Image (cartoon, grey):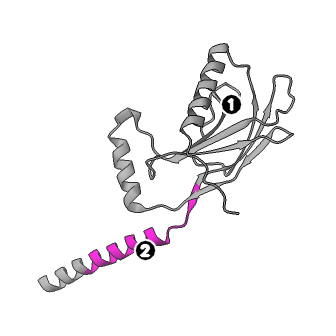
Amino acid sequence: MRYMAQHFANRCIWIGLITIAFSTAAYPAYLNAPTWDVWVVDQAGHPLAGIKVSESYQDYSCESESHTEVLVTDEQGHVQFQAKYLKRDLKTCLHETASNLDAGVHASLGRHADVSVGFQCAADKRGYCIDWTGSPKQMTTKMTLQPLSPSEEKLQREIEEWRRQHSAPTPPSNP
Protein backbone atom coordinates (compact mmCIF):
# COMPACT_ATOMS: atom_id res chain seq x y z
CA MET A 1 0.00 0.00 0.00
CA ARG A 2 2.81 2.38 0.91
CA TYR A 3 4.55 1.61 -2.40
CA MET A 4 1.36 2.49 -4.32
CA ALA A 5 1.00 5.80 -2.47
CA GLN A 6 4.63 6.70 -3.17
CA HIS A 7 4.27 5.68 -6.82
CA PHE A 8 1.10 7.77 -7.14
CA ALA A 9 2.79 10.81 -5.53
CA ASN A 10 5.81 10.54 -7.85
CA ARG A 11 3.56 10.19 -10.84
CA CYS A 12 1.55 13.28 -9.82
CA ILE A 13 4.74 15.30 -9.39
CA TRP A 14 5.99 14.30 -12.84
CA ILE A 15 2.63 15.04 -14.45
CA GLY A 16 2.57 18.43 -12.74
CA LEU A 17 6.10 19.31 -13.88
CA ILE A 18 5.40 18.20 -17.44
CA THR A 19 2.15 20.19 -17.47
CA ILE A 20 3.91 23.35 -16.25
CA ALA A 21 6.74 22.93 -18.76
CA PHE A 22 4.33 22.30 -21.61
CA SER A 23 2.01 25.16 -20.72
CA THR A 24 4.94 27.57 -20.50
CA ALA A 25 6.38 26.45 -23.84
CA ALA A 26 3.02 26.24 -25.56
CA TYR A 27 1.49 29.40 -24.08
CA PRO A 28 0.63 31.69 -26.97
CA ALA A 29 1.80 35.28 -27.18
CA TYR A 30 -0.67 37.71 -25.61
CA LEU A 31 -1.52 41.35 -26.26
CA ASN A 32 0.98 43.61 -24.50
CA ALA A 33 -0.18 46.88 -26.13
CA PRO A 34 -3.18 47.57 -28.37
CA THR A 35 -3.39 48.86 -31.91
CA TRP A 36 -3.60 52.56 -31.09
CA ASP A 37 -4.73 55.26 -33.53
CA VAL A 38 -3.79 58.78 -32.43
CA TRP A 39 -4.87 62.03 -34.07
CA VAL A 40 -3.06 65.19 -32.99
CA VAL A 41 -4.74 68.57 -33.51
CA ASP A 42 -4.18 72.16 -32.40
CA GLN A 43 -6.65 74.07 -30.25
CA ALA A 44 -8.61 75.10 -33.36
CA GLY A 45 -8.99 71.42 -34.35
CA HIS A 46 -6.54 71.54 -37.27
CA PRO A 47 -4.36 68.44 -37.80
CA LEU A 48 -0.71 68.79 -36.82
CA ALA A 49 1.81 67.07 -39.11
CA GLY A 50 5.36 66.17 -38.05
CA ILE A 51 4.58 65.74 -34.34
CA LYS A 52 6.42 62.99 -32.43
CA VAL A 53 3.99 60.72 -30.57
CA SER A 54 5.34 58.20 -28.04
CA GLU A 55 3.77 54.94 -26.94
CA SER A 56 5.10 53.36 -23.75
CA TYR A 57 4.07 49.90 -22.62
CA GLN A 58 5.05 47.21 -20.13
CA ASP A 59 3.63 44.13 -18.46
CA TYR A 60 4.74 44.77 -14.88
CA SER A 61 3.91 41.17 -13.98
CA CYS A 62 6.32 39.70 -16.56
CA GLU A 63 8.84 42.39 -17.59
CA SER A 64 11.43 44.41 -15.71
CA GLU A 65 11.77 47.14 -18.36
CA SER A 66 9.32 49.22 -20.33
CA HIS A 67 9.24 49.68 -24.10
CA THR A 68 8.82 52.92 -26.05
CA GLU A 69 8.02 53.49 -29.71
CA VAL A 70 8.00 56.93 -31.33
CA LEU A 71 6.11 57.73 -34.54
CA VAL A 72 5.66 61.03 -36.41
CA THR A 73 2.20 62.26 -37.45
CA ASP A 74 1.32 62.40 -41.15
CA GLU A 75 -0.44 65.30 -42.94
CA GLN A 76 -3.73 64.39 -41.22
CA GLY A 77 -2.06 64.49 -37.79
CA HIS A 78 -2.39 60.71 -37.52
CA VAL A 79 -0.17 57.87 -36.34
CA GLN A 80 -1.03 54.23 -35.76
CA PHE A 81 0.88 52.07 -33.31
CA GLN A 82 0.58 48.40 -34.20
CA ALA A 83 -0.43 45.87 -31.54
CA LYS A 84 2.48 44.45 -29.52
CA TYR A 85 2.54 40.84 -28.35
CA LEU A 86 4.61 39.16 -25.63
CA LYS A 87 5.21 35.46 -25.05
CA ARG A 88 5.13 34.71 -21.35
CA ASP A 89 7.90 32.92 -19.53
CA LEU A 90 6.44 31.47 -16.32
CA LYS A 91 9.69 31.75 -14.36
CA THR A 92 10.23 35.41 -15.34
CA CYS A 93 6.60 36.28 -14.63
CA LEU A 94 6.75 34.72 -11.16
CA HIS A 95 10.02 36.55 -10.43
CA GLU A 96 8.74 39.95 -11.64
CA THR A 97 5.44 39.61 -9.81
CA ALA A 98 7.23 38.71 -6.57
CA SER A 99 9.67 41.62 -7.04
CA ASN A 100 6.83 44.08 -7.66
CA LEU A 101 4.92 42.91 -4.58
CA ASP A 102 7.93 43.97 -2.48
CA ALA A 103 6.97 47.58 -3.36
CA GLY A 104 3.79 47.24 -1.25
CA VAL A 105 1.12 49.83 -2.06
CA HIS A 106 3.36 51.26 -4.82
CA ALA A 107 3.46 47.95 -6.72
CA SER A 108 2.40 47.86 -10.35
CA LEU A 109 1.09 44.64 -11.84
CA GLY A 110 -0.33 43.69 -15.20
CA ARG A 111 -0.22 45.30 -18.61
CA HIS A 112 -0.10 49.07 -19.02
CA ALA A 113 0.27 51.29 -22.08
CA ASP A 114 -0.07 55.01 -22.75
CA VAL A 115 0.58 57.55 -25.50
CA SER A 116 1.95 61.07 -25.18
CA VAL A 117 3.31 64.04 -27.05
CA GLY A 118 6.21 65.59 -25.17
CA PHE A 119 4.99 66.15 -21.63
CA GLN A 120 1.29 65.86 -22.54
CA CYS A 121 -0.39 62.48 -22.12
CA ALA A 122 -3.48 61.38 -23.97
CA ALA A 123 -6.33 62.23 -21.60
CA ASP A 124 -9.94 61.16 -21.19
CA LYS A 125 -12.91 63.55 -20.98
CA ARG A 126 -12.20 64.23 -17.30
CA GLY A 127 -8.58 65.16 -18.02
CA TYR A 128 -7.03 61.99 -16.58
CA CYS A 129 -4.18 60.33 -18.49
CA ILE A 130 -5.40 57.26 -20.36
CA ASP A 131 -3.80 54.09 -19.02
CA TRP A 132 -4.57 51.02 -21.14
CA THR A 133 -4.66 47.93 -18.91
CA GLY A 134 -5.27 44.93 -21.15
CA SER A 135 -8.39 45.80 -23.14
CA PRO A 136 -9.78 46.77 -25.59
CA LYS A 137 -7.68 45.43 -28.47
CA GLN A 138 -7.86 48.76 -30.31
CA MET A 139 -7.72 52.32 -29.02
CA THR A 140 -8.51 55.61 -30.76
CA THR A 141 -7.40 58.89 -29.23
CA LYS A 142 -7.63 62.52 -30.32
CA MET A 143 -5.06 64.73 -28.64
CA THR A 144 -5.53 68.49 -28.62
CA LEU A 145 -2.12 69.99 -27.92
CA GLN A 146 -1.89 72.79 -25.42
CA PRO A 147 0.84 75.40 -25.83
CA LEU A 148 3.92 74.78 -23.66
CA SER A 149 4.93 77.25 -20.99
CA PRO A 150 8.39 78.85 -21.47
CA SER A 151 9.86 76.59 -18.76
CA GLU A 152 8.38 73.45 -20.42
CA GLU A 153 9.79 74.53 -23.80
CA LYS A 154 13.24 75.05 -22.26
CA LEU A 155 13.13 71.67 -20.50
CA GLN A 156 12.00 69.92 -23.69
CA ARG A 157 14.89 71.49 -25.66
CA GLU A 158 17.37 70.41 -22.96
CA ILE A 159 16.06 66.83 -23.01
CA GLU A 160 16.24 66.67 -26.82
CA GLU A 161 19.81 68.04 -26.77
CA TRP A 162 20.82 65.49 -24.12
CA ARG A 163 19.31 62.68 -26.22
CA ARG A 164 21.20 63.85 -29.33
CA GLN A 165 24.47 63.92 -27.39
CA HIS A 166 23.93 60.50 -25.82
CA SER A 167 22.43 58.59 -28.72
CA ALA A 168 24.48 55.82 -30.24
CA PRO A 169 26.24 56.84 -33.46
CA THR A 170 24.79 55.37 -36.63
CA PRO A 171 27.17 52.86 -38.20
CA PRO A 172 28.26 53.76 -41.74
CA SER A 173 26.41 51.93 -44.48
CA ASN A 174 28.30 49.57 -46.76
CA PRO A 175 28.16 50.56 -50.46
How many residues crowd around disc 1 within 10 Å: few (fewer than 14), some, or many (20 or more)?
few
The answer to whether residue 1 is visible is no
Q: Does the magenta stretch include residue 14?
A: yes
For badge 1, the amino acid type reads Asp
Q: Mark 2 points at which residue?
A: 22
In the orientation shown, which residue stands out farthest toward the front?
175
Looking at the picture, how far across and down is residue 171, in whole percent? 60, 53
Which element is circle 2 on? helix
Indicate left or right for 64 with 169 as reference.
left
Stretch in magenta = 11-31
Task: State the residue in front, 49 or 126.
Answer: 49
For badge 2, the amino acid type reads Phe
Instruction: Identify the image quadrant of residue 168.
Output: top right
In the image, what residue occupies the spot 63% across and 27% down? Answer: 119
How many residues crowd around disc 2 within 10 Å: few (fewer than 14), some, or many (20 or more)?
few
**Residue 167 versus residue 149 in the image, above or below:** below
Looking at the picture, how far across and down is residue 163, in whole percent? 57, 35
Rendered-image quadrant of the N terminus: bottom left
Q: Name the residue under label 1.
A: 124
Task: State the residue in front, 50 or 55.
Answer: 50
Looking at the picture, how far across and down is residue 112, in whole percent? 55, 43
Looking at the picture, how far across and down is residue 43, in whole percent? 81, 22
Q: Main secondary structure of the magenta part?
A: helix
